[in-house]
Image (cartoon, helix red, strand yellow):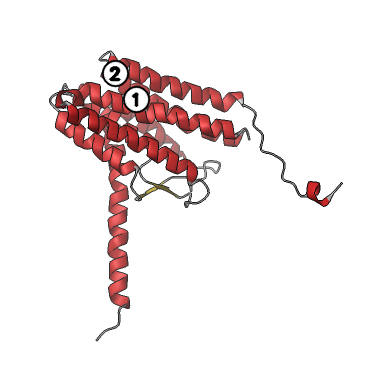
Amino acid sequence: MSEEHEYTTPPKRRGIYLLPNLFTTAALFAGFYAVVQALDGQFQTAAVAIFAAIVLDGLDGRIARLTHTQSEFGAQYDSLSDMVSFGVAPAVLSYTWALQPLGKIGWIVAFLYCAGAALRLARFNTNLGVIDKRYFQGLPSPAAAALVAGFAWVAHDLGWTGAELRWPAALLTAFAGISMVTNILYWSGKSIDLRRSFPFVAAASVVLSFALVSIYPGLLFLLFLGYALSGYVLAFWRWRHKRRHSANASPQP
């Protein structure tokens, strides 16, 4: 055997693993179902379907890592599924629910969000292994989708129509779309080791949180709104800290 063959890296497996891709397909179905329901005027159902896609999207990657069934196909399939569930579906929901009366401005804002999601996913795929895993660069597309869908869900529960909230919906949709393509860092949560044991109080708090969200969907919207704003707060704090450090380091006359 020659030296060349001894040190050749074996090619990456290109097979299709069933279990994680089933969850990805389910997330894709939820996103497509959200589009259908939004076009039918069932806006609350569409919003719930987007949140279902968020949950399923969070499971497929973890299952792939736990079962050692990661593949290049799965990564690309997941990205395309995310584009439908967190790019197209929220944009269609926002437009059909609230932005349509704004005419040209409405569909431009919806497209701005959709394009932001596409750019965010493309940048995430190209920056794998480059960016610190503790942070996301730009608002993650599932969080942006939750922001748009959560607003429609809460408004529906409070009896408000999309036409009444068309300008707040336009501002929120544009904010979510722009936040996805910024360089602002967001905490990823990947530093949490889910394999270690947690106190019983922490587990009970998670169960209580699910119960409260099912009763008051507005809490879920406020949670993601706080997360979306946290990146800007953290960026401002870092800017202030850096500016103060530079002022202290500058030589005195």
Amino acid type, mark 1: Ala
Q: Which mark is residue 25?
A: none
Residue 20 coordinates in the image, percent (x, y): 56, 27
- Residue furthest to the top in view is 40
* Residue 82 x/y as whole percent: 43, 30
Q: Which mark is residue 89?
A: 1
Q: Residue 17 is drawn in which quadrant?
A: top right
Q: Where in the figure is residue 64, as x and y percent of width and height?
A: 58, 33
The kind of secondary structure element at disc 1 is helix
- SS of the residue at dot 2? helix
* Of the pair 177 and 225, the residue shown nearer to us: 177
**Relative to 138, is 170 on the left or the right?**
left
Q: Is residue 9 visible?
A: yes
Residue toward you, 50 or 195: 50
Identify the image quadrant of residue 250. Answer: bottom left
Residues packed near mark 1 inside 10 Å, few (<14), some (14 to 19) or many (20 plus) = many
Residue drawn at x 42%, y 38% as measured from the top left: 121
Evaluate if marks 1 and 2 touch, with contact meaning CB atoms under 8 Å apart: yes
Q: Earlier in the sequence, mark 1 or mark 2?
A: 2
Name the residue at 72% across, 41% down: 10
> According to the image, label 2 marks what residue?
38
- Under mark 2, the amino acid is Ala
Q: How many marks?
A: 2
**Looking at the image, residue 176 lies above or below residue 80:** below
Residue 147 seen in the current view: no
Q: Quadrant of the C terminus?
A: bottom left
Residue 117 horizontal side relative to residue 159, left or right: right
